[in-house]
Image (tube, helix red, strand yellow):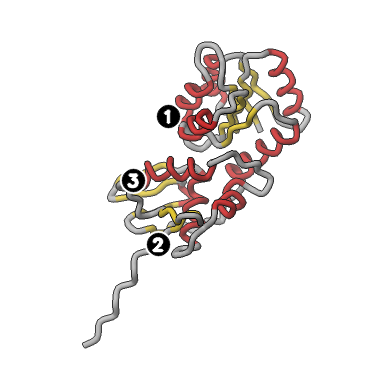
Amino acid sequence: MLILLAEDDPITLDGLQECVEREGFRVLKARGGQEAWELWQKHKPDLCCLDVMMPGLDGYEVCRRIRAQDSHTPILFLSAKNEEVDVVVGLQLGADDFVRKPFGRHELLARIRSALRRTHSPTQSRLHFQMKDLTIRPRELRADRAGRRIDLSPREVVILELLFERAGEAVSRNELLDRVWGVDYLPESRTVDQHIARLRKRIELNPDRPEIIETVRNAGYRYQPPPLPAEGYE
């Protein structure tokens, strides 16, 4: 597995490299956002760890450019910024995780392994399933509506699969964290809510009045399937 590490502080970058290489990963090092973007274009790594505050292109811009071409490769932000708005911005741009500095070696590696496992483990998903007017095709990482294609990340597919499997029931945020992010994930505030909000913007006809992913107050989220047609009698 090839991991791109982007960090403008050389001491921190060397420490990250040593930590990751000791676990058997190969590493690409970038000392700034522009170098990170060029390395990603050339090598297409399996995972990216991006510092937020970098000279030239910051981590947010690098993430935005990657997501414009690739919705699947895991992206982790590394940042000393502790405001919730910073986490929200990162997740809305399509990042998979936001790791706040200072962090421990074991925490970082757990998050890297979790992200890679979700993305690269073989799927046993069904070929397709229907959520109202939306057809989800898990193995192709996409959905279709009236001939329009909507690309999905592996994590978004798992969210939809879980809601579909539990149709009509409220699925709690803790259940979503366990199923989608993994038991070794250390959740940040509102992680689930931000991912659901981003997914709604892509799959709902009206994200302000969602019909596929409903909010269940004080409980979580729910997919409510349409009622079965009544049987007619002659």
Residue 61: image x %, image y %? 47, 22
Q: Earlier in the sequence, mark 2 or mark 3?
A: 3
In the image, which is nearer the foreground, mark 1 or mark 3?
3
The quadrant in which residue 129 appears is bottom left
Q: Residue at 65% across / 41% down in the picture?
A: 186
Please give the residue where the numbered disc 3 appears in the rendered image: 208
Amino acid type shown at disc 2: Gln
Indicate left or right for 40 with 151 as reference: right
How many other residues sit within 10 Å of disc 3, few (<14), some (14-19) or many (≥20)? few
Q: CA distance from mark 2 to mark 1?
A: 31 Å
Q: Which mark is residue 68?
A: 1
Q: Quadrant of the C terminus?
A: bottom left
Per the image, the residue denoted by label 2 is: 224
Whether residue 28 is visible: yes
- Nearest the viewer among 218 and 228 is 218
Residues at badges 2 and 1 in contact (C-beta under 8 Å)?
no
The residue sitting at the bottom extreme is: 234
**Among all residues in the image, which is located at the extreme left?**
234
